[in-house]
C-alpha cells in the first residue's frame, strides 16, 4: 500500500512540476513573430485576470514616440496623428481625444508603466492574444493587402457629426502637412507685405490632443520656427473665427512662393511650396515650368500603410523611403533635373494624392519604389510594372539598369493596372526591388549597399530615358 501511494505521489509531482515552472516564467511578448527584448524595466505580467504589458517597449517597437510626465504620472504615446495618454492609477485613458475605459488602471513597476493588453490592441489597432500555457503575449500588426497595390485608399469611418478636428501640423522639405479627423474644404491664398501663404480650414477646430501636445496656448494657437527652409521662416496657427469655427495656418515666407495643394481621402492636406509669384486662390495651382525635367520619386506606403512585412519584421515602407531618399539625393546633383519626392518621412498619403503631386508639378516622369511580398517565401526577384503604353520605354530602361546591380532573379517588365501608374498622365513605372518575404532577397534588400546600388541604377535609368526623349543632354 505504501509503495502504491509513493508511486501515485511521484506521478502527481511530475504532472504538477511543469505547471509550477510555468507559474514562475516571465511572460514573453512576440510582435509580428519576433520576440521583444524585455531586459529593461518590468516585464509583462499576468495580474489576476488581466494581462499587463509594458507600454514603452511595445510602443517603441511599433514606431511610436513615448514621453513620461513625472508630475502627473502620465505617459503620452504618439505616432503621426494618433495620440494616447494614460495616467497611473486611473481606469480611463484618452485615445485621439476620446475617453476609453480600461480593464485595470495602469501601474508603475520598476520605473515601467504596465497597461492592460486588451487596451494595447484597441488603442494601437493590433490583434492581441494570450497563451496561458506558454505565458506568451502575441501582438500582430494589421498591414494592408500586399502588392499589387489596391486601387482603393484607406478611408476613415464616416466623419463625426459637427466640426472636423485638426490633429497635427508639420513642415518638412517645403511641404506643410495637416492631418484632420474629418472632411475639410481648405482655402489657400497668398498675400504680400510681408509675403505669406494663408491656409484656412472652415468648420474646423483644434483637437484636444493637438492643444496638449503641439499648441503653446490653451486656445490652440502656437507656432513652429523653420530653420532648414529657404522659403519659410515660421508656421503660425490659431482660431481665426468662431462663427463659423475656422482654423487659420499662416506660413511666413522669406520670398514669394507658389502653393500647390492636394487633399487626400484620408483627411491629410498637403501644401507644397515652390519659389514663384502666383500663389493659389482656393484651388490647386500649377507651378511655372523652369525648363528642367521634373522627376517625381514616390516611396510607396507610409504611416498606417506599412506595406509588406519582411521575414524578420521590417516594414516595406521604411525600405521604400530609404531608397527613395537616396534617389532624390543623387538626382539633385544633376542641374538639368528638378526632383520632387512624394514623402520624405513616415507621412501617410493616399494613392490619389501621389498622382496629384505628379500632376501639380507637371512631372515628366513618375517612379514609384516598392518591395514585393508573397504568401510563401519562394518567389523572388526584380520586376518593373507599367500600365499605359507611353510608360513602356521608361519601364524597360529602368529595368535594364536595376536588374544587373541587384543580382536577383529577372521577373521581367510587366503590364499591371495600378492606381499610380494608371491615373498619372506622364510615363509612370512601379519598381519592385525584391521580395521581402524571401529570406535571400530580404537579406540584401535591408543592406545599405544594396539600397545605394538600386538608387544609382534608378538614377542612371532616369537619365538615359530623359536623354532619349531630349529632356536632358
Image: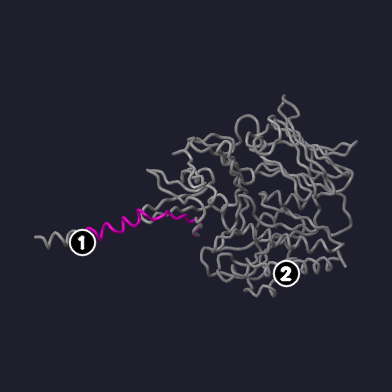
Instruction: Please give left or right for residue 360 compared with residue 76 in the image.
Output: right
Residue 153: x and y in percent read 63, 48
Q: Residue at x 72, y 36 (%)?
A: 185
- Quickly name the residue at label 2: 396
Q: Kindly report which numbered mark, 1 or 2, lies closer to the viewer in this rendering.
A: 1
| Residue 377 - label | none
Q: Residue furthest left?
A: 1
Taking the magenta stretch, the answer to whether it contains residue 98 is no
Q: Nearer the viewer, residue 12 or 146?
A: 12
| Residue 10 - label | 1
| Element type where label 2 sits in the image | helix
Residue 322: x and y in percent read 68, 60
N-term mark: 1 or 2: 1
- Magenta stretch bounds: 11-33
Instruction: Please give left or right for residue 409 compared with residue 187 in the image.
Output: left
Q: Residue at x 68, y 43 (%)?
A: 268
Q: Residue at x 58, y 59 (%)?
A: 308
> Distance between the Cα atoms at labels 1 and 2?
73 Å
Crowd rating for badge 2 (residues with CA inside 10 Å; few <14, some 14–19, many 20+): many
Amino acid at each position: 500500500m505504501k509503495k502504491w501511494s509513493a508511486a501515485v505521489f511521484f506521478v502527481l509531482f511530475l504532472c504538477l512540476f511543469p505547471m509550477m515552472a510555468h507559474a514562475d516564467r516571465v511572460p514573453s511578448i512576440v510582435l509580428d513573430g519576433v520576440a521583444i527584448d524585455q531586459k529593461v524595466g518590468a516585464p509583462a505580467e499576468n495580474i489576476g485576470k488581466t494581462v499587463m504589458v509594458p507600454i514603452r517597449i511595445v510602443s517603441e517597437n511599433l514606431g511610436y514616440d513615448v514621453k513620461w510626465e513625472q508630475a502627473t504620472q502620465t505617459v503620452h504615446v504618439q505616432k503621426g496623428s494618433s495620440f494616447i495618454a494614460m495616467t497611473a492609477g486611473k481606469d480611463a485613458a484618452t485615445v485621439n481625444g476620446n475617453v476609453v475605459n480600461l480593464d485595470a488602471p495602469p501601474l508603475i513597476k520598476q520605473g515601467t508603466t504596465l497597461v492592460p493588453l486588451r487596451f494595447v490592441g484597441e488603442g494601437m489597432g493590433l490583434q492581441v492574444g494570450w497563451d496561458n500555457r506558454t505565458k506568451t503575449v502575441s501582438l500582430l500588426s494589421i498591414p494592408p493587402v500586399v502588392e499589387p497595390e489596391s486601387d482603393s485608399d484607406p478611408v476613415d469611418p464616416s466623419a463625426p457629426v459637427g466640426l472636423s478636428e485638426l490633429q497635427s501640423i508639420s513642415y518638412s522639405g517645403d511641404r506643410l502637412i495637416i492631418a484632420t479627423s474629418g472632411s475639410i474644404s481648405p482655402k489657400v491664398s497668398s498675400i504680400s507685405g510681408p509675403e505669406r501663404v494663408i491656409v484656412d480650414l472652415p468648420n474646423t477646430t483644434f483637437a484636444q490632443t493637438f492643444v496638449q501636445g503641439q499648441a503653446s496656448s490653451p486656445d490652440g494657437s502656437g507656432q513652429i520656427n523653420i530653420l532648414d527652409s529657404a522659403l519659410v521662416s515660421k508656421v503660425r496657427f490659431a482660431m481665426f473665427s468662431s462663427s463659423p469655427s475656422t482654423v487659420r495656418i499662416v506660413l511666413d515666407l522669406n520670398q514669394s512662393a507658389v502653393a500647390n495643394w492636394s487633399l487626400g481621402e484620408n483627411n491629410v492636406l498637403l501644401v507644397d511650396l515652390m519659389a514663384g509669384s502666383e500663389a493659389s486662390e482656393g484651388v490647386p495651382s500649377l507651378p511655372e515650368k523652369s525648363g528642367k525635367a521634373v522627376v517625381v520619386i514616390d516611396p510607396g506606403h507610409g504611416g498606417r500603410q506599412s506595406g509588406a512585412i519582411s521575414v524578420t519584421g521590417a516594414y516595406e515602407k521604411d525600405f521604400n523611403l530609404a531608397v527613395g531618399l537616396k534617389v532624390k539625393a543623387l538626382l539633385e546633383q544633376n542641374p538639368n533635373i528638378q526632383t520632387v519626392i512624394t514623402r520624405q518621412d513616415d507621412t501617410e498619403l493616399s494613392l490619389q494624392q501621389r498622382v496629384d503631386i505628379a500632376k501639380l508639378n507637371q512631372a515628366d516622369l513618375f517612379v514609384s519604389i516598392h518591395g514585393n511580398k508573397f504568401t510563401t517565401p519562394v518567389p523572388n526577384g526584380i520586376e518593373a510594372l507599367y500600365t499605359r503604353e507611353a510608360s513602356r520605354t521608361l519601364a524597360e530602361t529602368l529595368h535594364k539598369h536595376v536588374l544587373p546591380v541587384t543580382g536577383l532573379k529577372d521577373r521581367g517588365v510587366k503590364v499591371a493596372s495600378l492606381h499610380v501608374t494608371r491615373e498619372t498622365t506622364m510615363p509612370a513605372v512601379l519598381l519592385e526591388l525584391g521580395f521581402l518575404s524571401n529570406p535571400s532577397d530580404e537579406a540584401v534588400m535591408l543592406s545599405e549597399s544594396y539600397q545605394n546600388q538600386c538608387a544609382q541604377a534608378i538614377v542612371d535609368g532616369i537619365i538615359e530615358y530623359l536623354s532619349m526623349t531630349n529632356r536632358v543632354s
